[in-house]
Image: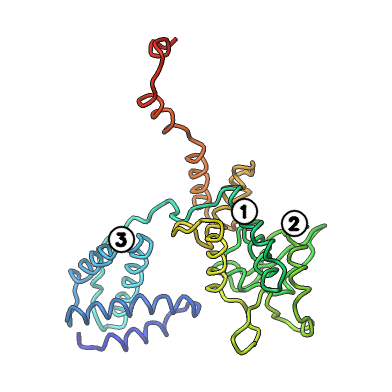
């Protein structure tokens, strides 16, 4: 290479017309690639380098989605270099990987959700306990993402029609141009938490709906990472200590339980704010699989002892 890849990475990131969080994600991918080149002493990467790097990612057992993202970022990076007349597009004709169409994060059953909420209610005797309960019921009853909960402000709670709603800034959005409904029960739990908060500055804008405290006692907006840890801990408290259950499982639980309780696929699509119904249909397939008893039918046919009449189909 007749250029320093670290410098070109910085130039490329600055060139991107993306949000800062997306730029940081792209940069992380490219830094990992740069470290791979340095670790292998590769000074003149070519198409075979990209192919071996893809194999390297596969051997590290990264998810198909993570590998595909890395390839997409590298493809964009080398197209940028070609546009600048710096290098060739060595990613040309390198195939991506097939991204799994089912979620590895599992939904909770209705019984497990009730256990999580019951356990959170028992701890809702302090401000933190009331906050955690409010977040848990909000996630389970709206299908919100953790980042959407982080972005929520107190003034985003409003009235639409005859009920309360929470305006949200969804994935890939710049404004809070959508909302989720808050049932009276959820609103009361939120209100019980907000009553414990210092409301001195509520006339100002951007009052975080959920906060946490630093060691210095300073109150700050509760971050996504902290929300995820809290949710994970609430799952462990009822015995769900598996990688299959994470904060995002609350969204999967909302979707699957909605379908099980009779909501249409279109209603769930709107609730989850999916751009394409194919994303929502994944949950529909999951529900059908959960309802299926084909495994039991086959197991009974080959493993259970039958009477003589049953064997003859009588």
**Circle nearer the viewer, 2 or 3:** 2
- Sequence-earlier tag: 3 or 1: 3
Towards the viewer: 164 or 125? 125
Q: Which residue sits at x=53%, y=50%?
A: 280
Q: Which residue sits at x=42%, y=75%?
A: 25
- Helix, strand or loop at label 2? It is loop
Image height of 261 relative to 228, above or below: above
Mark 2 to mark 3 CA distance (whole Å): 43 Å
What's the colour scheme?
Answer: rainbow
Q: Which residue sits at x=62%, y=53%?
A: 115
Q: Are marks 1 and 2 in contact (CB under 8 Å)?
A: no
Residue 310 lies left or right of residue 237; in this view the side is: left
Q: Which residue is mark 2?
A: 183
- Helix, strand or loop at label 1? It is helix
Q: Are marks 3 and 1 in contact (CB under 8 Å)?
A: no
Kindly identify which numbered label has been placed on residue 96: 3
Mark 1 to mark 2 CA distance (whole Å): 20 Å
Q: Quadrant of residue 270?
A: bottom right
**Circle nearer the viewer, 1 or 2:** 1
């Amino acid at each position: 290479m007749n250029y320093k890849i670290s410098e070109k990475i910085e130039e490329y990131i600055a060139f991107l017309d993306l949000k800062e969080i997306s730029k940081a994600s792209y940069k992380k991918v490219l830094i990992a690639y740069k470290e791979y080149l340095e670790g292998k002493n590769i000074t003149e990467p070519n198409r075979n380098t990209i192919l071996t790097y893809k194999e390297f990612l596969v051997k590290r057992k990264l998810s198909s989605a993570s590998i595909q993202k890395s390839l997409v970022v590298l493809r964009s990076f080398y197209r940028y270099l070609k546009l600048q007349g710096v290098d060739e597009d060595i990613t040309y004709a390198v195939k991506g990987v097939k991204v799994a169409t089912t979620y590895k994060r599992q939904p909770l059953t209705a019984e497990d959700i009730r256990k999580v909420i019951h356990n959170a209610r028992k701890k809702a005797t302090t401000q933190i306990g009331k906050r955690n309960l409010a977040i848990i019921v909000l996630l389970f009853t709206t299908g919100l993402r953790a980042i959407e909960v982080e972005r929520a402000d107190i003034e985003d709670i409003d009235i639409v029609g005859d009920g309360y709603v929470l305006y949200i800034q969804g994935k890939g959005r710049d404004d809070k141009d959508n909302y989720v409904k808050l049932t009276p029960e959820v609103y009361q739990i939120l209100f019980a938490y907000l009553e414990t908060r210092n409301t001195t500055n509520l006339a100002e804008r951007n009052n975080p709906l959920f906060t946490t405290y630093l060691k210095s006692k300073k109150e700050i907006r509760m971050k996504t990472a902290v929300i995820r840890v809290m949710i994970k801990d609430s799952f462990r408290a009822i015995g769900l200590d598996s990688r299959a259950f994470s904060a995002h499982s609350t969204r999967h639980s909302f979707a699957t339980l909605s379908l099980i309780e009779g909501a249409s696929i279109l209603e769930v699509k709107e609730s989850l704010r999916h751009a394409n119904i194919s994303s929502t249909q994944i949950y529909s397939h999951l529900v059908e699989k959960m309802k299926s008893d084909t495994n039991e039918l086959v197991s009974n046919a080959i493993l259970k002892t039958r009477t003589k009449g049953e064997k003859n189909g009588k």
